[in-house]
Amino acid sequence: MNKTLAVVSYEIRATLARKAFLIVGLGLPLLAGLIVLAMIWINRDTASAPPVAAEAERDAQQVVGYLDPGGLIQVIPGDIPNARLLPYSDVTGAQAALEAGEIDGYYLIPADYLERGDLTYVQLEYQPLSFTSPDHRPIEWTLLVNLFGGDVAAVDALANPIEVEWQQATPPGATEPVSVDESWIAELLPNLMAFLLYMVIILPAGTLVATVTDEKKNRVMEILLSSVSTIQLIGGKIVALGLLGLLQTALWAGVVWSVVYLGGEGLSIPPGFQIPSGLLIWCFVFALLGYAMYGSMMAGLGALASDIKDSRGATMIVLSPLIVVVMFLIIIVARPDSPISIALSLFPLTSPVAMIARMTATGVPAWQPVMAAALQLLTAVLIVRTVARLFRAQVLLSGQPFSLKAYGSALLGTS
């Protein structure tokens, strides 16, 4: 146990000394967090601020007149100040008021308005390209209210006949889904969570294969294997990079938390929107188990490759299940309960990313994430034991060139 802890300590120090890991693994989420906080700070007053001052002032000061020879308008709605909509008995009086600057314009409501349905608006200058076009909402609202005999409630019901609150049915025993809301964060969150989990799995795994390859190339591996067993060596390396992976997960979770809980109206986050705590816990579980599987396989690549360049082709093959999940992410989010989505979320090599995407998009029966985690744990144990065979001294020191055939045979225990 002490030797394993020594390997863990050594690996953490060696990884933190790598500039690439510090920049991509730790610096990137910290930079994203600072950007999010800056956006929140910049927009904190914008959300609560009134509309553009010029537009608000224009709407408040705009006064118009109207001529209604048919007597259609009998009442001015209470939410329209009387000073904004002035009646005139003839065109001469309205035109004089317009030229004197008492009104901004006036409407001509024809006597046969109910048959024709059109109005004429008169102003001093016709400016079709002006950004300060007249506000026709007061006269429109006034006509509607009068057409309904002054019943404001009826007009309001006509303008907004229904108000639908959409809820997604959750199967019995399902995990709590993310709050449903027609906002950018609700639409983006499943893809964002899946992408973040993808990153926190492949970054430590990529670092592990680079570490093993460098130690093998520099003959450091020979010294380590002279004092520790292969299980202690591979186990210590996986645990060390796993801890750093959890740190990355925590940093990215902090970024998401900042967006959801601190963004508020400044980032157009709905007041009731929240991420269930259970979902965050599952993120840590799947990130750790996913890394254990892929980190072990990447360590096996490093054990057989004489140089990091030799393992690049095999790296893409090892990571291909995660790449497949990213390709099917649109289907998983749009149809989280489809057979292909369920299959990808239960298959060990694809479930870390696929299951989180499903759990973010919809309610998932509790047995599914539990089963997915159990299958991932079993797969990780089998892979770790298999990869440990690749760290035998005779394999590491043989000097044979890397090949996919040798890697597959060793991983399956047929070499």
Image: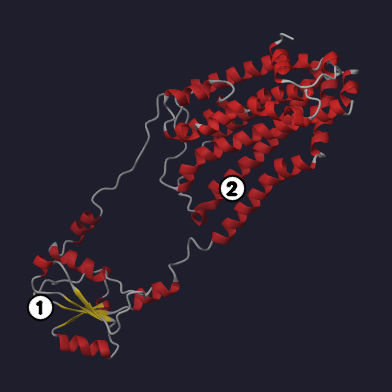
Residue at the location (71% across, 22% down)? 296
Q: Is residue 175 visible to the viewer in this orientation of the structure?
A: yes
Q: Position of residue 167 (x, y in %)?
A: 36, 37
Q: Is residue 365 visible to the viewer in this orientation of the structure?
A: no
Residue at the location (20% across, 68% down)? 142
Residue 69, label in figure: 1
Relative to 396, say whether 360 is above or below.
below
Compared across the picture, whether 341 is left or right of 68 comes to: right
Callout in the foreground (2, 1): 1
Q: Position of residue 332 (x, y in %)?
A: 47, 31
Of 81 and 256, which appears nearest the observer? 256
Of 285 and 403, which appears nearest the observer? 403
Colour mapping used in the image: secondary structure
Q: Quadrant of the C terminus?
A: top right
Q: Label 1: state its secondary structure.
A: loop
The residue that mark 2 highlights is: 258
Q: Amino acid at mark 1?
A: Pro
Of 388 and 170, which appears nearest the observer? 388
In 3D space, how far apart are the residues under numbered discs 2 and 1 (Cα atoms)? 60 Å
Compared across the picture, whether 6 is left or right of 77 comes to: right
Q: Label 2: state its secondary structure.
A: helix
